[in-house]
Amino acid sequence: MTANRPGRARPAVVAPTDCWYALAPSESVGRSLLAYRVAGLPIVVFRTTTGQAVALHDRCVHRPYPLSAGHLDGDSLRCGMCGFIYGPNGQCLSVPTQSRIPLGAAVPAYPVREEQGLVWVWAGEPGRAALHRLPELPWLTKPGWASVGGDRLVQAGFLLLHESFADVTKIPVLDPALSPSVLKALPPPLEVEVTETTVSLSRKYPPGRLPDWQAHALGRPQDEELEHLQEGHFLSPAAWVDHWDVVLDASGTRARMRFTQLVTPVDDRSSRLLWRVSRDFGVEDSATAARLAELFAPYYATLAVALETMQQVFDEDGPEPEVNVSSDVAALRVRQIVQAMLAEERAPVPARRPANLTQRQLSPPRTPGRAQSV
Amino acid sequence: MTETYTSLREHEGDLVVEAVDQVAEDVVAVTMADPGGDSLPPWTPGAHVDLILEPDLIRQYSLCGTPSDSRTIRVAILKAPDSRGGSVYVHQRVHPGSLVRVRGPRNHFPLVASPRYLFIAGGIGITPLLPMMAAASAAGADWTLLYGGRTLASMAFTDELGPYGNRVTLVPQDELGILDLDTALGQPRGDTLVYCCGPEGLLGAVEQRCAAWPAGALHLERFAAKPAEPDAAADKPFELVLARSGLILTVPADKSVFDVVQQAGVSILGSCHEGICGTCEQIVLDGEVDHRDSILSEDERALNETMMICVSRACSERLTLDL
């Protein structure tokens, strides 16, 4: 069946580890032990008595027992099974049955940075952490902005999430009730800009009406037609940010929204999604905050279901060739960047296409000589 | 039918020159920042940018600063009077405060993780290797650098290499002769990646001596196109299928794949048009490629998975690209 279909198979992707992933909001990391998994690695996170966030490999060196199921005593972590005690640098400090500590007894400590209201963890080679920057998300903490958000485990690989963020036409299909009127009109030209490690897309919509909640929050008449500007940014495998700005007057004043989607690959088929919807208008307005939460929590739930469905198809039936269209260039570029990252880490990089396609002739398009878009 | 026109471009912007430092005889290091103080795009060791000095004067230079520095980038430029004008332009007309148009970064010389590296630099070829050595040190890898130049005074960044001590071997030709590649590369090693950048003579010599090394061990970066291209008079027309766009085109004998694709209205990236910068790389879905670029290794060519469409053509009558 597969051999008769044009296109290329989606690679089954493992996740890069040489990347800062936003594991948790700062306020949720405290004196209790939190268990996470990043790119397949078990990680226990806690805060020391001096307030330092710490991330250690979540497995006792003695026997396969998670340290997150143990106890925090001061700045030390005691295994709940065997009583080995570890310091915040991962070094074993004592064992219950002998006075000498076994040589080399330590769990890996993962580099941690706490910035922009988030605890970021580096799951790759620790020495390379300092060479990589964090994505810049100033609207999460800057005065003059307010955010609502949530997080969820999505049973889908992290690349499926990024590819869906890169697909600008999905919102009106997924959740027609949510999308502004301009999104339902014909999509304007898509501009895609790339660098070595990032992908950005932008679109400028002709004037259209604001959704009810936004007209209310901005105190604008509902039938007013305003210009909308949309941007999407793949900043790293850990972050996709959307901008959605409305131009309010002739001088170009904007009402700005930022949709921050922080993705952490859990394993090759599940991801954590931490989302924030930020605005620089109606910042003090609790009704606007409530309305945004009411709109976007279900939106991300709907998106998660769609992604999980795709992952299920992928799991059950395996990769099959897929047809891409011109506007998929952003998603394809994201895939290329991830593949290059994996190649540099010497992680297993999936083949670009299955061997059975190499000798296959493509069936010619139906209308030769004329551009088609979907 | 509704059409969404998609245009693709590389990041491009004017940067302000913060410093021009003489780092060796005829070599200046140019440090640039965003005029508004914005962060510059992230990059990894081995990356390069285009300096768009004039509309028709676009040159590629490796980034030789620190990837974690979000505020500035640095390139180093050798004044080569017999070159095509880029280096002379920079040496004469770029000063602190000048605005320079920069496109990129992009990377076709990435540093792959390895327990051990052998870096080989010829002259100004030291530039992409500088951030690589810093990254290799940070990752705890074992590495050595063999660095040759005309004279010690002509060799850039010897001061920055000082802290690396005996990892670095400086070989000024007027004192010590040419690099001893036979000793450095004579014994293939499975745990070592070789990274080499420099003039064509050095690259060719290293390539030759690495023939017995494991596939994928050698990584090269060229400043100029490889010599000895096939006879252009023998070029034949062929059919070009752009799968994603749903187009079938003809590439005549006297036009490149790049030009034909662009004239058909499909938005693609391109920069050097000589097969050295890698910007126009495209995925090949079907057909046999006549590779003429200076980027892909023999192994990568044999895979027939991608091609540089500015110079490479088809051996088969039909070529299908993922475009």
Image (cartoon, helix red, strand yellow):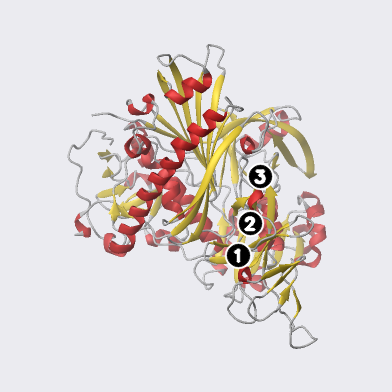
Percent x, y for residue A218? Answer: 52, 20
Q: Earlier in the sequence, mark 2 or mark 1?
A: 1
Q: Residue furthest top?
A: A250
Residue, disc 3: A117
Percent x, y for residue B298? Answer: 45, 62
Residue, disc 2: A121
Q: Are marks 3 and 2 on the same chain?
A: yes
Percent x, y for residue A238? Answer: 55, 50
Q: Tell whether A258 sits left or right of B232.
A: right
Other-residue count near label 3 (Cα within 10 Å), few / some / many at <14 / 14–19 / ≥20? some
Q: Quadrant of the N terminus of chain B?
A: top left
Q: Earlier in the sequence, mark 3 or mark 1?
A: 1
Cα separation between marks 3 and 2: 13 Å
Cα separation between marks 2 and 1: 9 Å
Cα separation between marks 3 and 1: 20 Å
Task: Kindly identify the amino acid type of the residue bearing the numbered disc 1.
Answer: Ile
Q: Which mark is residue A31?
A: none
Q: Nearer the viewer, residue B199 or B51?
A: B51
Q: Are marks 3 and 1 on the same chain?
A: yes
> Is B229 situated above or below A143?
below
Q: Are marks 2 and 1 on the same chain?
A: yes
Q: Which mark is residue A43?
A: 1
Q: Secondary structure at mark 3?
A: loop
The residue that appears at 57% across and 75% down in the rendered structure is B190
Badge 2: chain ID: A
Q: Quadrant of residue B175?
A: bottom right
Q: Nearer the viewer, residue B151 or B62?
A: B62
Task: Kindly identify the amino acid type of the residue bearing the numbered disc 3.
Answer: Gly
Task: Kindly identify the amino acid type of the residue bearing the numbered disc 2.
Answer: Val
The answer to whether residue B201 shows anywhere in this view is yes
